[in-house]
Image (cartoon, grey):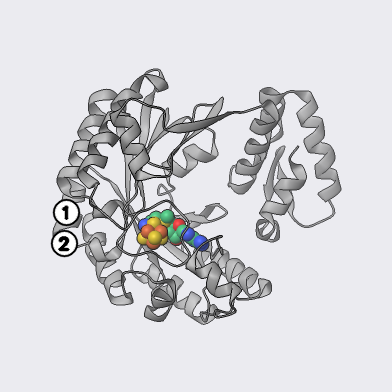
């Protein structure tokens, strides 16, 4: 099994926190779709006829694409790849694009999972983030989407300036009332070279202290599990049968191809990333030139990625798997380092599988780095 990721690099407005690759101009949209379809076609031999179980449109803002844009991408994929009988097909969307007609068009394109970038149900929060929608648009979009999509996910960000635990609780409560199946929830990260980073440096925006962020996170775990959503990864919660197969394929080291500018690919041996520039991407594809860089993974790299990703998931790190995949030396290193962490209430062991406790999840990156080589 393998997965496909398609990066759509267009946005209407630059959110102040965002460092993903996007451009505000759609002038090159037609040329982009053409180049993208060419990349999809050119790379079909890379997966050596493996079956695709997940297709994911991410961005940027994929919901800026028209029915016909998505249709031509899907047709190219289906023509050149072997797709499983019941693939998960996800599209990320922004609430302001989700009219009744557009939602139905997405469904007619066989997209079966809709992910909506809500971020917050507070219009003040949304303004601070420089989002292109307000709270009402988010609620209206989710009500419409709920009627059409069986698998509905939202993204929420916590730790926003001026937005405390009460607003966060309101966000979680509303998400439950709107009956979403899945929530990805991220702690606000101040990324370099963003408008948010500049404002924080100039002390124009206050950030929440760590203990408030930790409380918000631990409260989220409690609240969502009491409402039937399982935390299957540090930042992801889903009802039973609604865990994102695409995300899981990343965390369980399945191969995937990433198409479009800035998209990453992985084949078990190498990571490859496309140029983060739309013009260079289009020009290179049109002229059959190279547009990516790659890194060959050492066994240490693979072990580190394995430990980090598994530890973040509900599956945990199975000690036999370390031994089978990487050998006894890696198993010894893992167990020896683990002993140093043993007295902290961070990791629990179930049938030779190691998982993070809730207090361990708060420190996941630190714990993973201790266990890595
Ligand atoms: C790259 S966005 C693409 C989705 C879509 N364009 C949107 O904005 O809703 C994917 C998600 O990453 C999260 N995200 C991006 N930058 C972040 C940051 N600096 N801190 C926390 N979450 C972030 C947001 O929740 C966002 O919905
Ligand atoms: S968060 Fe989404 S909509 Fe905002 S700039 Fe980033 S990719 Fe675009």
Number of on-image labels: 2
Q: Is residue 258 above or below residue 169?
A: above
Which SS class for mark 2? helix
Tag 2 near tag 1, CB within 8 Å:
yes
* 315 lies left or right of 185: right
**Quarter of image, res 336:** top right
The residue identified by callout 2 is 100
Q: Is residue 9 above or below residue 165?
A: above
Please report the residue visible at 58 percent of the width from the left and 77 percent of the height from the top: 202
Please report the residue visible at 80 percent of the width from the left and 26 percent of the height from the top: 329
Tag on residue 327? none
Q: CA distance from mark 2 to mark 1?
A: 6 Å
What is the x, y in percent for residue 235? 53, 56
Residue 149 in sight here = no
Please report the residue visible at 70 percent of the width from the left and 25 percent of the height from the top: 326
What is the x, y in percent for residue 317? 66, 39
Q: Pointer 2: residues within 10 angstroms few (<14), some, or many (20+)? A: some
Pick whichever, 311 or 162, lies toward us. 162
Residue 287 in sight here = yes
Pick whichever, 365 or 229, lies toward us. 365
The residue identified by callout 1 is 104
Pick whichever, 342 or 90, lies toward us. 90
Q: Pointer 1: residues within 10 angstroms few (<14), some, or many (20+)? A: some
What is the x, y in percent for residue 121? 38, 74
Which SS class for mark 1? helix
What is the x, y in percent for residue 300? 70, 30
Ligand 2 positioned in quadrant: bottom left
């Amino acid at each position: 099994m393998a997965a496909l990721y398609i990066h759509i690099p267009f946005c209407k407005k630059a959110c102040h926190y965002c460092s993903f690759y996007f451009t505000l101009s759609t002038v090159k949209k037609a040329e982009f779709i053409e180049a993208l379809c060419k990349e999809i076609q050119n790379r079909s031999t890379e997966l050596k006829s493996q079956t695709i179980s997940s297709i994911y449109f991410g961005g940027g803002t994929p919901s800026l694409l028209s029915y016909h844009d998505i249709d031509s991408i899907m047709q190219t994929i289906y023509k050149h790849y072997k797709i499983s009988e019941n693939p998960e097909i996800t599209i990320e969307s922004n609430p302001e694009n989700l009219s009744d007609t557009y939602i139905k068009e997405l469904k007619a394109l066989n997209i079966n999972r809709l992910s909506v970038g809500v971020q917050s149900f507070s219009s003040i929060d949304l303004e601070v983030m420089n989002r292109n929608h307000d709270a009402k648009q988010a609620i209206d979009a989710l009500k419409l989407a709920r009627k059409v999509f069986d698998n509905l996910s939202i993204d929420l960000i916590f730790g926003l300036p001026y937005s405390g635990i009460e607003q966060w609780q309101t966000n979680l409560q509303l998400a439950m009332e709107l009956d979403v199946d899945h929530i990805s929830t991220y702690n606000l990260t101040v990324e370099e070279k963003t408008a948010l980073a500049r404002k924080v440096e100039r002390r124009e925006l206050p950030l929440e202290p760590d203990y408030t962020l930790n409380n918000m996170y631990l409260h989220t775990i409690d609240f969502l599990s009491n409402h039937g959503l399982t935390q299957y990864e540090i930042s992801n919660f889903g009802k039973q049968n609604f865990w994102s197969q695409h995300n899981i394929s990343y965390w369980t080291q399945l191969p995937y191809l990433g198409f479009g500018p800035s998209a990453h690919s992985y084949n078990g041996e190498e990571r490859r990333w496309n140029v983060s520039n739309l013009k260079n991407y289009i020009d290179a594809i049109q002229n059959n030139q190279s547009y990516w860089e790659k890194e060959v993974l050492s066994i240490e790299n693979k072990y580190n990625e394995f430990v980090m990703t598994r530890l973040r998931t509900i599956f945990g790190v199975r000690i036999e798997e370390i031994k089978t995949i990487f050998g006894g030396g890696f198993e010894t290193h893992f167990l020896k380092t683990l002993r140093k962490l043993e007295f902290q209430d961070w990791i629990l062991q179930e049938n030779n599988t190691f998982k993070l406790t809730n207090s361990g999840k708060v420190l996941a990156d630190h714990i993973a780095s201790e266990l890595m080589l």
